[in-house]
Structures are given as C-alpha cells and as structure tokens.
Image (cartoon, grey):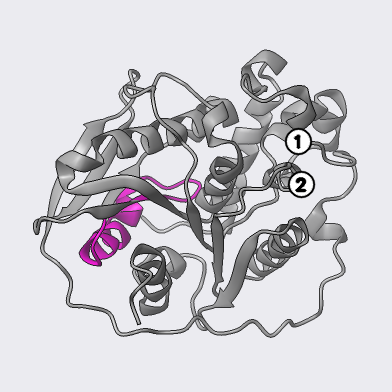
C-alpha cells in the first residue's frame, strides 16, 4: 500500500487530537522525577522547524555505500501477538545460528507492518532478528507509544529464541515511525501499556530514521496546545532532547530522500541533538521520494550494517 504526505498528516492529526483529549495522568511519565520532565520553552509558538533559520539548500552528505554480504536465509513468523489487546508483529530471523542484534522496524503513518516487510526481510538478511509491529495511532500517543514500547520489550525478551542477543536494540522508523522511534530513544521506559512482556527496557540503543518527521507541533490546532500544553509536550521528541544526563552511548542516523519537509525536520532535529551533545549524523539518498524511503535501499542497508556489525568495512 502506497501512501503520501497527506496520509501522514491525517494520521498525525488523529494521534494529536486524541492526545489533547487524554487526561494528564494517562500521558505523564510515571517513572520520571519532576526535574527530568521535558520542557519546551513555549508550546504555542511556531514549531522548531518553522522558526529555525534553515539554509535554502543545505548540501547533505550522500549516504555512503559499503560492500554488503550475501543475504542470509531467513525464517518468518507472521502475526505474533505482543499485547493483551492483540496487537501483532512479524519476526524475521536468520536460519543460521548466531548471537544476532535486535532491530525494531516501524511503519509510517497510515501504514501497517506489511508496508515495511521487504525492508525488515532485508535487514534480517544482514544478520539480525527483526521485529516489525503494527502500532495503533488511533489510540492516541499514549497508546501508539505504549504499543512500540511493548514491541521493544517483547523483542528483547524473545530475541534468544530466534538466535538474537538482547544487549543491543536498533529502531528503524519511516516517516511518523521516525518520530515514534525518536521518542522511544528518550522515554521508552516511561510507557507501559498492556504488554505481554512487561519487563525489560524499551529504550533502543540507536535509531535510523527514514524521512522521519519529528516535529508534531505544526499539525496541532493552536487552541489544543493552549488548553492542554502538557499533552502536546509529551508527544514532541524535541522536548526530551535537553534532558540531563543525556544517553551518551546512543546514536542517531537520519536519512532523507527528496521530500522537503523531511529535510527540514531532520536538519532541525540534528541541530537540537548536536547542541545537546548526542552522536548524530544526517545524510541523503538522492532521487528517492517519501514512499521509496521505506523500501530496502543499498544506502539504508549500509548504514544499518555499520550499526549492526561495527567491524564491517
């Protein structure tokens, strides 16, 4: 199923409007002390992306290619429940025995896990156990983020039965999935939900975003954020960037194609991450539209390969 930017916008508006109707209790992290609650200077002002002084045409480095190994033979488990409410995920794992890293692949707004199935297969073929969940944006952000947190915990807990090793988890998110993945990087352990596996960390160790759209504020009616500012803050990855201490060991790899809003989002998010002291890089895959960024690409797989297997050339 192909989708376009307007589908992302519709899904995000649905998510955000639901957010502003959810109680403060439902949205607030229960484990973070008050001193670490994310604070955005003013929610009702124009967004980071809209107000940032961006160059007319920044020259992004091109995503570098590396030699990739022959794809491993993989096994597939389709429609595996990971929440009590029967949210489903797919698992792709090498047939060959090994202690494989774990990857969570997140579809974009308006999509389902089948949209990223080819990408998930290709990543598994590099030598990893891949979990590709459906997550429900109609539940509002608490539900959507809780779903992804549950999927991450499920992946860690069940990696060993697929030949995986739970010590390192990478999240790969397309479009809206890039925003959800980014929020998991900062606050995954603060979302619980009806996980079948409630134990374990939901904090990934690295993110690869594919045309990620990180800033939700432009899509929220101003009156919603004026009346429920905390609800807006809770779904905005930018408000978590300045938390101290930072997660100094994690990495963010931002990839963009030709879609201009993704350039603006990625550049603003990169700048915020750099200012906070995070390890982040931004590169472009020329010639790809927004839909094509969720498909397996040599450049995408090269970036992921370097994260999966640091000893790769």
Q: Secondary structure at mark 1?
A: loop
Answer with mark 1 or mark 2, whichever residue precedes in sequence.
Answer: 1
Give the left or right position of residue 173, taking residue 196 as reference: right
Tell me where residue 227 appears, x and y as whole percent: 85, 24
Q: In the rendered image of this protein, does residue 284 appear above or below residue 187?
A: below
Magenta segment range?
103-128
Give the left or right position of residue 34, taking residue 140 as reference: right
* Residue pictured at 62% horizontal, 65% vertical: 280
Q: Is residue 142 magenta?
A: no
Tell me where residue 148 appears, x and y as whole percent: 45, 36
Residue 105 visible in image = no
Q: Is residue 121 magenta?
A: yes
Tell me where residue 104 appears, x and y as whole percent: 37, 48
* Picture disc at residue 38: 1
Quarter of the image for the C terminus: give it: bottom left
C-alpha distance separating marks 1 and 2: 8 Å
Q: Estimate how packed mark 1 is, as few (under 14), some (14 to 19) or many (20 or more) residues with alpha carbons within 10 Å.
A: many
* Picture disc at residue 242: 2
Foreground of the two, 135 or 149:
149
Q: How many marks?
A: 2
* Residue pictured at 20% horizontal, 41% vertical: 160
Give the left or right position of residue 16, taking residue 123 as reference: right
């Amino acid at each position: 199923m192909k989708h376009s930017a307007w589908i992302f916008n519709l899904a995000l508006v649905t998510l955000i409007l639901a957010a502003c109707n959810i109680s403060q209790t439902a949205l607030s992290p229960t484990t973070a002390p008050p001193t670490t609650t994310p604070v955005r200077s003013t929610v009702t002002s124009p967004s980071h992306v809209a107000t940032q002084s961006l160059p007319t045409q920044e020259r992004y480095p091109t995503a570098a290619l590396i030699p990739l190994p022959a794809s491993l033979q993989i096994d597939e488990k389709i429609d595996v429940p990971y929440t009590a409410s029967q949210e489903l995920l797919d698992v792709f794992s090498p047939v060959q025995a090994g202690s494989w890293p774990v990857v969570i692949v997140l579809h974009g707004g308006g999509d389902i896990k089948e949209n990223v199935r080819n990408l998930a297969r290709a990543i598994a073929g590099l030598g990893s156990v891949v979990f590709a969940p459906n997550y429900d944006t109609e539940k509002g952000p608490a539900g959507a983020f809780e779903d992804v947190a549950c999927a991450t915990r499920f992946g860690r807990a069940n990696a060993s039965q697929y030949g995986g090793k739970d010590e390192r988890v990478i999240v790969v998110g397309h479009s809206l999935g890039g925003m959800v993945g980014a929020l998991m990087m900062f606050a995954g352990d603060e979302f619980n939900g009806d996980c079948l596996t409630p134990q374990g960390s939901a904090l990934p160790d690295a993110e690869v975003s594919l045309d990620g759209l990180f800033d939700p504020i432009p899509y929220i009616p101003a009156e919603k954020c004026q009346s429920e500012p905390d609800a807006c803050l809770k779904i905005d990855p930018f408000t978590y960037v300045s938390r101290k201490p930072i997660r100094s060991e994690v990495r963010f790899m931002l990839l963009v194609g030709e879609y201009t809003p993704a350039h603006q989002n990625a550049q603003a998010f990169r700048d915020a991450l750099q200012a906070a002291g995070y390890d982040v890089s931004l590169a472009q895959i020329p010639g790809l539209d927004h839909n094509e960024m969720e498909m397996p690409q040599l450049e995408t797989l090269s970036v992921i390969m370097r994260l999966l297997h640091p000893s790769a050339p």
